[in-house]
Image (cartoon, rainbow, N blue to C red):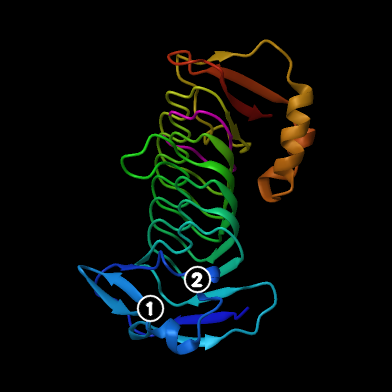
Amino acid sequence: MSLWHLKLKTQPGLRLDLRSINPSTLAQLSQREIEQLPLPSGNRLTPLGEWFSVQPLEAHGTDLLIEGDLSKVDRIGWQLAGGHVRVQGPVGDYVGAAMSGGHLTVHGSAGALVACEMAGGHLTVNGNVGDFAASTLPGSMDGMRGGQLVVHGDAGARLADRMRRGTVVVHGSVGDFAASRMVAGTVAIAGGCGAHPAWGMRRGSLVMATRDEQQRPQPSATFVPAVADAAVFWQLLSRDLAQHGGAFAGLPTRPIRRWLGDLATDGKGEMIFPQ
């Protein structure tokens, strides 16, 4: 299996679509064949070699390295099913969308719709992400369906909208309507949170790990304080989240307050506030 390093050499004037580029596609191709692969740019197709230099990669643990200012390059890791893709630099929209396996690591910030409809695998963004991360593709009803998204910066609005399964961990703050219309899964936030968190939540868990009362959102009127004890469940969940370090490291030793809702829908979700 061949390993490849794609380095951006020309900044595209229009959005560039990299959905067809993944380790399995490139594995059996020669350098010349990779350079001739067509990439959508605006309303035309252009050869990959027009935008990227292609070189063999000698790096352990990485199958594909993409490098450069990729802020106008979309759909990196689209439907990724295996292998390890590493991106060095900022990226555009739809990063890791519809992933079902493998590892995708971004050393930079990302645009909108990161990990939307992700079904498996691991996606790590060592920067900020835009709106609608771990949510739905436009026109769809189901958001993230599995896997793990870890954001080491901040996230925009509508994080995990309509999320069905999986885990989202944000080490920074998030925008409005976090975990809105959530069906199931876990969202853990280390920093502050915008307005209307867990709006329309049906099931699932939203964990607010910050100790700063000013950053903690107030549950809406359609959430009620929990009466039943959840010590065993919390130990299992908190130990899993503690592996991410930072504000999550001490969660297993912190007691919690829980609020149940959204009672305007199924009312089986929860907001968890470690003390």
Q: Which kind of residue does numbered mark 2 sit on?
A: Thr
Secondary structure at numbered mark 1: loop
| Percent of width and height locating residue 41 | 27, 71
Q: In this view, does 30 lie above or below 63?
A: below
Q: Name the residue under label 1.
A: 37
Q: Mark 2 points at which residue?
A: 25
Q: Is residue 236 above or below residue 25?
A: above
| Percent of width and height locating residue 32 | 44, 89
Q: Which kind of residue does numbered mark 1 sit on?
A: Leu
| Percent of width and height locating residue 247 | 67, 45
Q: In which quarter of the image is the C terminus?
A: top right
N-term mark: 1 or 2 = 2
- Furthest-top residue in this view: 227
225 in magenta = no
Give the residue at x 42% y 67%: 20
| Percent of width and height locating residue 154 | 49, 51
**Contact (Cβ within 8 Å) of mark 1 with mark 2:** yes
Q: Is the magenta stretch mostly helix, strand or loop?
A: loop
In this rendering, position of residue 12 left or right of residue 148: left
Segment tinted magenta in the rendering? 181-194
190 in magenta = yes
In this rendering, position of residue 66 left or right of residue 229: left
Give the residue at x 72% y 34%: 237
Question: Observer-nearest residue: 182 or 120?
Answer: 120
Give the residue at x 40% y 44%: 132
Q: Quadrant of the N terminus?
A: bottom right
